[in-house]
Image (cartoon, helix red, strand yellow):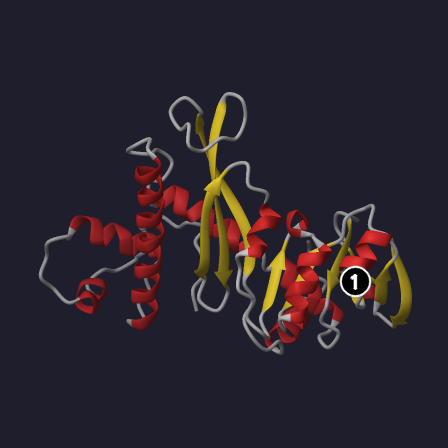
């Protein structure tokens, strides 16, 4: 999705209270004969890492490891909603009964509507079409079961990408933020994709050291814990190094008795250091 106006989106996004945790699972696949405890398909095994990423610090606030057959939407049943927080999720989590439970808990959600979703328009607000917005409507669900699962009103925002001409339809239960902010919130979901890519690339989780359930889950938790500890250290020490550089420094000095601040202060990330365009930006 192309920004209609980067500065305008930043202003809209800055005015949103609370934190915005996007939800997304990542799948680690393998051979089923080696991982019989994680069924996925007839010849394949897989585990899913369902993650809630807090955008205030790019740190996961909730993680659930399951086999590959567990549908994404079922994770909403074990998630404890936080009142006032925005939950940004893709269409895999679109279940109106569960979303209504989230709404009643005081949380807000932003998701994409499915093509076959039937709604009835209640009201419409004016939009600036030059920004890419097509409509900003208040709607109610029309289907019998859908309306029964979510009896309240929803906000429907349609946005057309000026470059690709692709039309995106978003649903949310928050009526107070600007329509462009709804689009910006959904775009922030890409951060969780970068988080998983970073985990796979830099924490050596592409291959497992064991095949048992305990071995695999232990390796995943160790990788995630390493990421969180380094991210917290980077933020508290106010270090200007990237997470990848900090991990490289720690890997060659595991037994050095030296304060972390001094260790990272003596490391200069100069022009000869490789630059990773997919590096997560931590505040």
Where residue 238 appears, as percent x and y from the top left, is: 32, 71
**Measured along the vertical axis of the image, is residue 279 above or below residue 10?**
above
Q: Is residue 109 visible?
A: no
Q: Which residue in the structure is indicated by mark 1?
A: 157
- Residue depicted at x 77% and y 61%: 150
Q: Quadrant of the C terminus?
A: bottom left
- Residue depicted at x 39% and y 42%: 201
Quarter assignment of residue 220:
top left
**Measured along the vertical axis of the image, is residue 243 above or below residue 174?**
above
Quarter assignment of residue 38:
top left
Which of the pair 160/23 is nearer the observer? 23
Q: Is residue 63 left or right of residue 121?
A: left
**Measured along the vertical axis of the image, is residue 177 above or below residue 231?**
below
Q: Is residue 20 left or right of residue 178?
A: left
- The tally of labels here is 1
Which of the pair 182/3 is nearer the observer? 182
- Residue depicted at x 83% and y 69%: 128
Q: Residues within 10 Å of mark 1 (few under 14, many from 20)?
A: many
Q: Is residue 63 visible?
A: yes
Q: Secondary structure at mark 1?
A: strand
Quarter assignment of residue 240:
bottom left
- Residue depicted at x 80% and y 54%: 146
Which of the pair 254/119 is nearer the observer? 119
Where residue 112 appears, as percent x and y from the top left, is: 72, 54
């Amino acid at each position: 999705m192309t920004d209609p106006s980067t500065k305008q989106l930043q202003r809209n996004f800055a005015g949103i209270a609370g934190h915005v945790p996007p939800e997304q699972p990542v799948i680690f696949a393998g051979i089923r004969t080696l991982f019989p405890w994680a069924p996925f398909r007839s010849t394949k095994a897989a585990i899913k890492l369902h993650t809630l990423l807090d955008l205030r610090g790019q740190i996961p606030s909730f993680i659930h490891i399951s086999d590959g057959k567990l549908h994404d939407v079922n994770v909403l049943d074990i998630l404890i909603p936080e009142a006032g927080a925005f939950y940004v999720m893709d269409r895999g989590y679109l279940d109106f009964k569960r979303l209504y439970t989230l709404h009643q808990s005081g949380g807000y959600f932003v998701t994409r509507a499915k093509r076959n979703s039937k709604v009835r328009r209640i009201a419409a607000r004016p939009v600036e079409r030059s920004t890419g917005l097509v409509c900003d409507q208040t709607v109610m669900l029309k289907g019998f079961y859908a309306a029964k699962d979510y009896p309240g009103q929803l906000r429907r925002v349609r946005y057309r990408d000026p470059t690709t001409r692709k039309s995106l339809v978003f649903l949310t239960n928050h009526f107070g933020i600007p329509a462009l902010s709804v689009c910006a919130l959904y775009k922030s979901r890409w951060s969780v994709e970068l988080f998983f890519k970073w985990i796979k690339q830099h924490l050596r989780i592409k291959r497992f050291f064991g095949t048992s359930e305990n071995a695999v889950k232990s390796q995943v938790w160790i990788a995630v814990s390493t990421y969180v500890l380094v991210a917290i250290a980077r933020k508290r020490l106010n270090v200007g190094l990237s997470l990848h550089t900090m991990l490289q420094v720690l890997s060659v000095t595991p037994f050095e008795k030296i304060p972390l601040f001094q260790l990272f202060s003596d490391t200069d990330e100069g022009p000869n250091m490789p630059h990773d365009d997919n590096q997560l930006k931590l505040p």
